[in-house]
Amino acid sequence: MFIKRLPTFEYHAPVSIAAALDLMARYKNNGRFIAGGTDLLLAMKKREIAPQHLISLNGIAALKGISLDKKGGVKIGALTTLAEIERSDIIKKQFLPLRDAVDVMASPQVRNLATIGGNLCSAVPSADTAPPLIALNASLTLVGPRGKRNVSVEAFFTGPKETVRKAHEILTAIMIPKPEPSSAGCYIKLMRRHAMDLAIVGVAAYLKLDAGKKVCKEARIALGAVAPTPIRVPEVEALLVNKAIDEKLVTEAARIAGMQCRPISDIRASLDYRCSMVEVLTRRAVMEAYRRITA
């Protein structure tokens, strides 16, 4: 049964990471961090969880914003909203697969509230930000009482709604390396509607070509909504590397991708349909990444 009224809780609004960690240490299992709240508050209304203390991260300026680092990569604060990513010229010009993803996520109202950190920490297999970040070789910064650690986005997820983040840790930033010359990526999402829907299948592709823009020197392919966690397909990547990109090669790579996924059948799509669509979307994503390099 869906319960609309939120359970009773105490709200805390720290203004620093240290203060937020202190509050979590005090309340332990009775506390939860909250960012945009678009997933957490819904879970509370459904009585899936009932934390007695919500520790808001929204007042912590260090967790917000998009900036270039000294090496030309980008740092995205975990509290940056999807709408801010959508509007960012940095993301639009250099990290287009992530822009592809946020463009097809939720509604404008939700994108104004939902944060990239919250989307990652929810660890839903169909979450759209994970595949493009994996394809872009992104990493995450986690801060806890024992200090800071970095983990790749690929290694972050351990199962549906499960990650390596400990309850007392805060995801503070997403780091994406500087794009290499002659490289580009793409994210394509299949959904039942044109907007406001979860992914049936999501495919992100990244290619780096040689100086002549003919031969693939590096490839990363990431799939979403077809396994308990977002996955890469190394067999496809190995097939593409050191070969000239053409329709025949990409068609074979896409066929292998369709064989490597591990989806389930549910109300949105059957296992067989998802595997077929992985093949279709992988071919489209790889060819679009190639087009973006050579255009």
Image: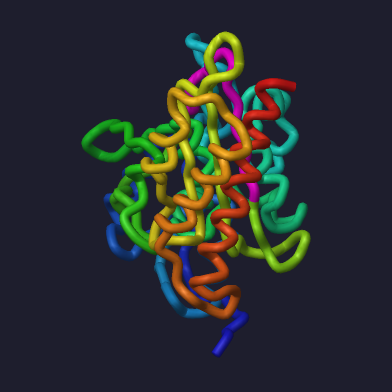
Identity of the residue drawn at 54% across and 75% down: 270
Q: Quadrant of the N terminus?
A: bottom right
In front here: 179 or 165? Answer: 179
**Compared to 268, does 26 lie above or below?**
above
Is residue 177 part of the magenta span, yes or no? yes
Where is residue 77? Give x, y as percent: 53, 33
Is residue 191 part of the magenta span, yes or no? no
In front here: 156 or 236? Answer: 236
Horizontal side of residue 31 vs 178, given as left or right: left
Where is residue 295? Give x, y as percent: 75, 22
**Compared to 285, does 1 lie above or below?**
below
Tally of numbered discs: 0
Where is residue 153? Give x, y as percent: 40, 40
Identity of the residue drawn at 70% across and 23% down: 93
Q: How is the image coloured?
A: rainbow
Q: Judge whether residue 79 can be spotted in this image.
A: no
Q: Place residue 50 in its image quadrant.
A: bottom left
Q: Place residue 38 in its image quadrant.
A: bottom right
Identity of the residue drawn at 57% across and 69% down: 273
Magenta residues span 175-188
**Compared to 111, does 99 lie above or below?**
above
Residue extending furthest front? 248
**Compared to 233, does 89 lie above or below?**
above
Residue extending furthest bottom? 1
Q: Judge whether residue 255 can be spotted in this image.
A: yes
In front here: 121 or 248? Answer: 248
Horizontal side of residue 200 vs 238, given as left or right: right
Where is residue 221? Give x, y as percent: 48, 41
Identity of the residue drawn at 49% across and 36% down: 135
